[in-house]
């Protein structure tokens, strides 16, 4: 038997379900990655840090496979055409993949399965990127959970050690076949992309990058719970892009977190469970991609405000922590979780702009962009989602700033024009009298924008917007 393992968001050669099953079941195993034109052609820019991140991960994966006697065949084209064609060329009996829960990926895999079947080949798919999938965690009534905490409890109750066991890929490497001549990894340039400023970011790539970040985080995991909400502190793991592209193994991370114990590790495990919760929300309810999880909120009348949206994107709203957050995103392709909540809340509740616009902007900028987590996060902040923030609880961007960046250290990093403003005033610099502003070398409205909206007025508009469509209890 000959197999072709098709890598997608699982760019590693260890603890890999599809690779393990192919190696165990088949005498000859080839490996392929497709730079999928259906995805790449839809990207808004040819400078994309994610394509760079993927490319760097492939360089490492290819080297690791080669060292074990195999290597990657890399194609640039439509995956729905390339995968069946390569299976034909290699005479593979079956294609092995890890399952993906996004609607477009499900449709793509169905099309590939159909094309393969018409030539007498099979597509074998495996659970890999989550611990529990599909209908494995349901309520007692057999329905998907719509609230996180009971989902987490059921997830933890169902967790047995075998769920966390790594696939011993290394025991079966002898079946790996080297790629045919001419199949080598193209340069980024050859596929028409550049990696933007990826190489300037403190963002190690590939399996080695994922391992280095995780090693660093293991030393800090005990403090995760205490520090994770403060963007100026190094409190979180920064593993999201690695989880997105599978350069780390969820089984290894979840296993460490569950056996480590302690409040830090427990809280972090809970975040990994949020990741699965949103993936399964998307799998059960694919229409959330462009509809509110709670259909009643599809009737919300959002404001069409191009200048407001542009100011938010550029980090020029006049609210320092919101602006620092957006500038962090634009510069680095990353935004701290607390800031994602604040920035998303500001767009939807202070500017009154549809969550879908913000979600799309994040989708273009984030290196860790993940449809399920991004959609879930945006709908949470917009109060339209699954287990979302109630609509009448509206973040105040100034008090959030005072609470989570008390000394303004994060603001100063990304909004240097406010560097001289004292800690006390940096969260709302427009309240400084003009004379004090001059003494500090700033002028609100000139050197830094005046607030684009008045929060109290915006809050009242949002409450009215939601009240208009919320059914009375
Ligand atoms: P850590 O705090 O170290 O958490 C570990 C991992 O748990 C993360 O890497 C991530 O995989 C997962 N995780 C943590 N929080 C969440 C969450 N709320 N939902 C789902 N998974 C979570 N995360 C993405 O991976 N991609 C996105 O596109 C994305 N968009 C978001 C948009 C909004 C509006 C919000 C509020 C959140 C979004 N998140 C997204 C979730 C979260 O902000 C990031 O996962 C986190 O900031 C990544 O940093 P980290 O790896 O250091 O996280």
Image (tube, grey):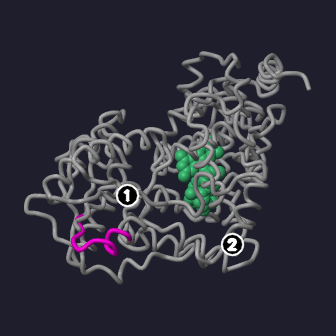
| Stretch in magenta | 21-30
Please identify the residue farthest to the bottom as the structure is shown: 171
Query: Dot 1, crowdedness within 10 Å: few (<14), some or many (≥20)?
Result: some
Q: CA distance from mark 2 to mark 1?
A: 34 Å
Residue nearest the viewer, comparing 46 with 288: 288
Give the side of residue 413 with respect to residue 222, left or right.
Answer: left
Of the numbered discs in the image, which one, if any, rests on residue 265? Answer: 2
Mark 2 or 1, nearer chain start: 1
Name the residue tied to disc 1: 124
Q: Is residue 324 visible?
A: no
Residue nearest the viewer, comparing 223 with 378: 378
Of the numbered discs in the image, which one, if any, rests on residue 191? Answer: none
Describe the element under mark 2 as helix, strand or loop.
Answer: helix
Q: Residue at x 25, y 43 (%)?
A: 118
Residue 301 pos. (x, y %): 69, 16
User: Where's the C terminus, which quadrant?
Assistant: top right
Give the side of residue 166 with respect to residue 24, left or right.
Answer: right
Total numbered labels: 2
């Amino acid at each position: 038997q000959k197999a072709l393992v098709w890598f997608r968001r699982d760019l590693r050669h260890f603890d890999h379900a599809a690779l393990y099953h192919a190696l165990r079941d088949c005498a000859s195993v080839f490996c392929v990655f497709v730079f999928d034109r259906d995805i790449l052609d839809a990207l808004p820019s040819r400078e994309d840090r994610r394509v760079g991140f993927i490319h760097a991960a492939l360089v490492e994966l290819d080297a690791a496979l080669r060292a074990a006697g195999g290597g990657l065949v890399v194609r640039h084209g439509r995956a729905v055409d390339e995968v069946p064609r390569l299976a034909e060329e290699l005479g593979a009996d079956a294609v092995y993949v890890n399952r993906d829960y996004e609607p477009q990926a499900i449709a793509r895999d169905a099309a590939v399965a159909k094309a393969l079947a018409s030539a007498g080949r099979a597509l074998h798919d495996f659970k890999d990127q989550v611990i529990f999938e599909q209908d494995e965690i349901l309520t007692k009534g057999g329905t998907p959970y719509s609230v996180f905490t009971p989902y987490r409890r059921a997830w933890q109750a169902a967790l047995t050690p075998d769920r966390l066991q790594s696939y011993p890929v290394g025991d079966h490497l002898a079946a790996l076949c080297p790629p045919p001549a001419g199949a080598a990894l193209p340069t980024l340039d050859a596929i028409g992309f550049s990696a933007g400023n990826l190489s300037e970011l403190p963002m190690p790539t590939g399996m080695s990058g994922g391992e280095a970040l995780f090693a660093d985080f293991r030393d800090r995991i005990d403090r995760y719970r205490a520090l994770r909400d403060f963007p100026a502190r190094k409190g979180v793991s920064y593993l999201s892009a690695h989880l997105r592209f599978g350069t780390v193994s969820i089984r290894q991370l979840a296993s460490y977190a569950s056996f480590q114990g302690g409040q830090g590790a427990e809280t972090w495990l809970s975040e990994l469970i949020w990741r699965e919760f949103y993936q399964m929300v998307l799998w059960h309810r694919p229409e959330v991609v462009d509809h509110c999880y709670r259909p009643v909120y599809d009737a919300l009348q959002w404001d069409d405000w191009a200048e407001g949206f542009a100011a938010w994107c550029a980090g020029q709203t006049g609210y320092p922590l919101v602006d620092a957050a957006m500038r962090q995103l634009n510069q680095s392709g990353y935004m701290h979780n607390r800031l994602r909540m604040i920035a998303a809340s500001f767009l939807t509740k202070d500017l009154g702009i549809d969550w879908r616009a913000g979600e799309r902007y994040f989708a273009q900028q984030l290196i860790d962009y993940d449809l399920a987590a991004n959609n879930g996060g945006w709908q949470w902040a917009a109060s339209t989602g699954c287990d979302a923030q109630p609509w009448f609880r509206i973040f105040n961007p100034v008090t959030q700033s005072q609470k989570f960046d008390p000394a303004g250290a994060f603001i100063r990093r990304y909004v240097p024009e406010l560097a001289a403003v004292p800690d006390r005033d940096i969260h709302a610099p427009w309240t400084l009298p003009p004379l004090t502003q001059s003494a500090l070398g700033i002028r609100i409205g000139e050197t830094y924008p005046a607030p684009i909206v008045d929060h109290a007025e915006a809050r009242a508009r949002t409450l009215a917007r939601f009240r208009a469509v919320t059914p009375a209890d």
